[in-house]
Image: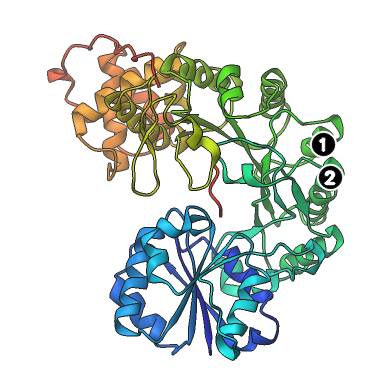
Amino acid sequence: MTILLSTLNARYTHASLGLRYLLANMGPLADQTRIQEFVIGAKTSDLVERVLAHAPRIVGFGVYIWNVEETTRLVALLKRVAPQLTIVLGGPEVSHETNEQPIVKLADYVVTGWGDVTFPKLCGEILDGPKPLMKVHAGVQPPMAEIALPYSLYSDEDIAHRTLYVEASRGCPFKCEFCLSSLDKTAWPFPLDAFLAEMESLYARGARLFKFVDRTFNLNVKTSLRIMQFFLDKIEANPDDPVYAHFELVPDHLPEALKESIAKFPPGALQFEIGIQSFNPEVQALVSRRQDNAKAADNIRWLTERSSTHLHVDLIAGLPGEDVASFARGFDQLVGLGAQEIQFGILKRLRGTPIIRHTEPFGMVYDPYPPYTVLATNRIDFPTMQRLVRFARYWDLVANSGRFAHTTRVLLADAPFENFMAFSDWIYTRTDATHRIALEKLAKLVQEWLQLRGMPREEAAALLASDYAGKVDKVDTQAAPKAPAAVAPVRQVRHLAA
């Protein structure tokens, strides 16, 4: 083997689609190329040993916001113990603001943007000459039909145990300034017949979980309908052999033909990720987000009431011009629409995104280290942002986990954001932690909070028992303090590449 393709995934269950695209398009170098994936959190010296065990001449690393710090250490150590090794970087994290990054200084070459054509060409020049003089190589975007599809490179192990990422298109026509896809001019579809043939092959090999990474799956409804019909045919032919597909939808574009198709799917077959981000028209205009809020709300309501789809709806806190009161109104509106999951995210300044133009006018302060989360704005101070970060974490543990479905409805009552913020503030004072809270302990804390807010112990225990099978009725109610006054929120305050 001459060329090793590698990356550090966030979890083992994430199989890198990008590495498989590179391998599929290596041409004459394919036989000399292998993939080796790692998971973040491993000891760097162990990773170096595993890389060098293959004795490669070239190692290409996929660099992302979640792995750049660990990959930097890995590259630095590789260059210490094997300086003859040629290291090539690619991926969204090194494709913008490239020359100022420590990892770029350590590496030999960088491919920015699309690597399907440029990376194999660069490897050929490194191996056979003439040796490239330039360090940074802008990726060439080929016609979509000329890109070899990578799905045969998913192994049987991948199919059995990992999420299979697929894409029917690349790019996005929208210009949301917090997203790297805002740099695209449009969306480019792959030839649909060839793509569906690959999906057929994956299905025949046993794949049943397909996660589409298309930014705008429902942009071309005719294409969307054909893809959804592919999955519907499988489900109808084998109702006892469930298939699961995940799509990202444009929220305000759900024509009747698409609704009719969606309504045919049984429970557990579809998940839609819908990026609302903000319901505030002024904030939307600031970040160049075009969205018909009324249509988006109507579509979410239709999906929750008239389909069996699982909805994952995104909101972003910390956008320029948005305060807590505005964010809370959007949050409460989404709760009222009934989405099963509300992903409460904090704004991140992804390298290369136009959101940077708002830094001075709106006092945007970002963490200088990945994932570059916003720390404060002129509408929100740092302590308030910290409260929102904790809110997001506890929301995942209690509401998005699905473990406290009945209890969550009571926790939120008629003022969802305000009530959950009060709970979030309280649980932090009780635990001084946002992670490593055992499920049984969390259930006890939720019960204690309900009692502090006036619910009788037996009623609170019964409510928790309806959600959680463990022993939750162990709170010392005899010594329970009086219910605190409601903590009024201070009225202030995706897309990563896969």
Residue shown at the point (32%, 67%) measured from the top left:
73
- Please state which of residues 220 and 462 is positioned toward the viewer in this rendering: 220
Residue where numbered disc 2 is placed: 225
Residue 213 in the image: above or below residue 439: below
Where is residue 54, by image quadrant?
bottom left
Query: Where, by quadrant of the figure, is residue 455 drawn?
Result: top left
In this rendering, is residue 359 above or below 57? Answer: above
Label 1 crowd bin: few (<14), some (14–19), many (20+), radius 10 Å:
some
Work out which quarter of the rendered image holds the C terminus and state it.
bottom right
- Residue named by callout 1: 258
Determine the image quadrant of residue 182: top right
Q: Is residue 84 visible?
A: yes
Residue visible at 25% across and 23% down in the picture? 426
**Observer able to see residue 154:** no
Q: Position of residue 32 (x, y in %)?
A: 59, 88
Q: Is residue 104 left or right of residue 334?
A: left
Rendered location of residue 77, percent (x, y): 31, 75
- State if disc 2 and disc 1 touch (CB < 8 Å): yes
